[in-house]
Structures are given as structure tokens and as C-alpha cells.
Image: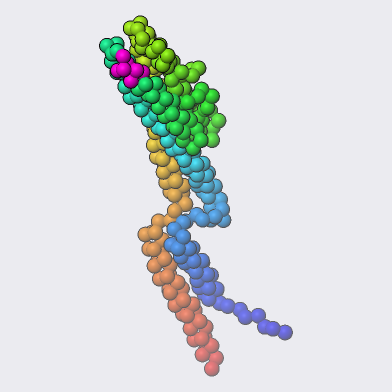
Amino acid sequence: MATEITLSAAARSSLLSLGNTANLIDRSNNRLASGLKVASPIDDAKIFFEAKALSDRASTLNEKKDGIDQGISSLSAALEAVESVDTLVRQAKGIALSAKTATGTELVSLVTQYNGLRTQIDNLATDATYQGLNLVNNTTSTLTVSFSELTTSVLTVGALDIRTNTVGGLGITSAGNDSLIGFSIVANIDTSIAQLDAAITSLRGTGQSLGSNVGLLQARLDFTESYVNVLDDGAGKLTLADITEEGANLVALQTRQQLGINGLSFAAQSEQNILSLFR
């Protein structure tokens, strides 16, 4: 039958202290290696899940940030188109004004230039597509940008039509080639100029609306980026280890461990001294 070895109280105390110190050293080493003081629910369930909630929200907002950024690009493409069309419409107005004093061949050339600009306006509006979405050549498309997981936190922008003579468009009619209808008399020229002035006013309003929405999205993008940093920083405050503190703890624990080993040695030596009395 095996005989149970009985340790002295001093030896048991030294061994217990050494075991606790070894656990603390392992903990400090793990924290220094991972940079985390709370890496799992085992370390601290309350803090772990509080930090996880912050990190999860930061991750969700990061996904929304990409959508906001793409929304800015979609609106910027539309705004560039509006500004370019405005330039072409102003050129067309210059041609219409010149037509008031033109005759014969010169008038025919001006009509051709005018109608050519109308075609280019329509082509430009059609080309202003970003990732399959065109916000300036129809009135049916919609841009929807979500800012967070809340269903009400969104921006919806409906498409506009800046083509020349479509329903809902700029209302710029063609200068007729037959008998120069549209530029053949001053009254018709004035009608065309009035159409162009109305188009310029409409484009100005469209540009302001698009620019306002771009500014809004940029503000939301800046806020989201800053907010994500705040959330990540908050999660880090809960879980990140203080490397300087953990380094100091490790040195202290190693010193304590050595003292514990010395204490265990002294306890064993005391038992040996007692044994020598019976020799």
C-alpha cells in the first residue's frame, strides 16, 4: 500500500503561492502577447460583451460608410452632368441670340449648331451613369443611402431629367430645318431663348439640390468615420491591456516567483535540519 507523503504547512504554503504566481505570470504573458486584458468571456464576461457590442456597431457603421461613399459618387456624377449641361445650354442661348441678326447661310449654320448642342445635351445626360444608376436622364430611378441599422436613418434622392425635350425634361424644342422654323422669325427665336432661360433656371435648382445632398452625405460620412473611431476606442478601453503595466507586473511576478522558490527551499531545509536531530 502506497504511503501518502505529508508536506509541512510551510511547504504547502510555498507551493500554493508558487502556483498562483505562475498563473499570474501566464496571464501577463498572454496579455503582452495579445495586447488584450479581456480576450474572451472567461476573462470578464460583462466587459467582453460590452466591448463586443461596441465593436459590432462599429462594424455595421463601417459597412454603411461604404454605401455613403458610393452615394456621394453617384450624386457627384449627376452634379457634374448638370453643370456640363448648363454650359451647353448657355452656348445654345448664345447661338439663339446670334440668330436674331443672322440671315441666309449663316442662319442655316446656326440652326445646325443649335440642334447639334441639343443632341450633345441628351447624349451627356445618358452617359452620366454611375454603377448602373443614372439620376439625370429619367424620373423613375432612386438613390437610397442608409446611414445606420435604423430603417428611418436614410436619404432618398429621386432622379431628374435634364434631357432637352422629354416629358419632365428641360423643354428645349428643336429648331426646325424646314423653312427654318424656330429661327425664321424673331418671335420664334424669342420663344427658344425663353425655353433656354427656363432650362438654365431649372438646372440651377437641380444643381443646388444635388449639391446640398452631396454636402449632407459628406457630413454623414465624416460623422460616421469619427463615430466608428469613438466606438473602436471605447471597445479598446474596455479590453486592451496596458503594456507598460503588464511589463512591470511580469517583472514583479518573476521576482515573487524566485522568492517563492527560495521559500520552498528554506522550508525543505528546515525539515532536513529536524531530520538531522535523529541521526
Q: Nearer the viewer, residue 38 or 203?
A: 203
Residue 109 in the magenta stretch? The answer is yes
Residue situated furthest front in the rendering: 105
Residue 144 location, x and y as percent? 51, 30
Residue 266 lies, with reference to residue 141, above or below; the image says below
Q: Nearer the viewer, residue 253 or 55?
A: 55
The stretch in magenta equals: 104-111
Residue 106 in the magenta stretch? The answer is yes
Residue situated furthest right in the rendering: 1
Q: Is residue 172 left or right of residue 186?
A: right
Q: How many marks?
A: 0
Q: Is residue 191 left or right of residue 60?
A: left
Residue 114 lies, with reference to residue 222, above or below; the image says above
> Is residue 212 in view?
no
Residue 22 location, x and y as percent? 49, 69
Instruction: Identify the residue at horizontal 40%, vertical 40% (top origin).
Output: 226
The N terminus - image quarter: bottom right
Q: Nearer the viewer, residue 96 or 7?
A: 96
The C terminus - image quarter: bottom right
Instruction: Identify the residue at horizontal 56%, vertical 53% (top origin).
Output: 41
Q: Main secondary structure of the magenta part?
A: helix
